[in-house]
Amino acid sequence: MIKPAKDCQSMSEVRIGVDAIDRELVALIVRRQAYMEAAARIKTDRAAVYDAVRIEDVVSKVKAESLKQGLSIEIAEPVWREMIKQSIAFEFKEWDRLRARQTG
């Protein structure tokens, strides 16, 4: 049984909760990745994959939502910046893969 964090009395209970949340996070990141795949399909210019203005917009929104929901900015910002970095790398690969398939 997954207990709320405030009710956990043992590390086993904490780990069960963390593992359950990790499964949820993976599912959410899979959904996010699908949008990176869509972006790679939609963008006609490879140079458009990296968008510094959009990166800062996303981070700004995440920081605001983190403050609203009680997530530490010290956790949120570096996690999102890394996720964005890896998402961009994924999108470049996907962009290249889709175009190689079209021309090959």
Image (cartoon, rainbow, N blue to C red):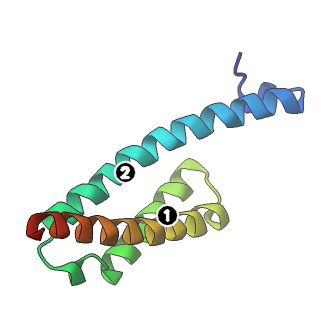
Comes first in the chain, label 1 or label 2? 2
Q: Are marks 1 and 2 in contact (CB under 8 Å)?
A: yes
As drawn, 7 above or below 30: above
SS type, badge 2: helix
Q: Which residue is mark 1?
A: 83
Cα separation, mark 1 vs mark 2, equals 10 Å
Tell me where residue 49 sits by quadrant: bottom left
Indicate the amino acid at tag 1: Met
Pointer 2 local density, CA inside 10 Å: few below 14, some 14–19, many at least 20:
few
The answer to whether residue 50 is left or right of residue 40 is right
SS type, badge 1: helix
Specify the farthest residue to the top.
1
The answer to whether residue 9 is left or right of residue 63 is right
Tell me where residue 57 sits by quadrant: bottom left
Image quadrant where one finds the C terminus: bottom left
As drawn, 8 above or below 43: above
Q: Which residue is mark 2?
A: 32
Q: What residue lies at 29% left-to-right and 64% top-to-bottom?
A: 94
Indicate the amino acid at tag 2: Arg
Rendered location of residue 24, percent (x, y): 53, 36
Q: What residue lies at 59% left-to-right and 69% top-to-bottom?
A: 78
Q: What residue lies at 33% left-to-right and 69% top-to-bottom?
A: 93
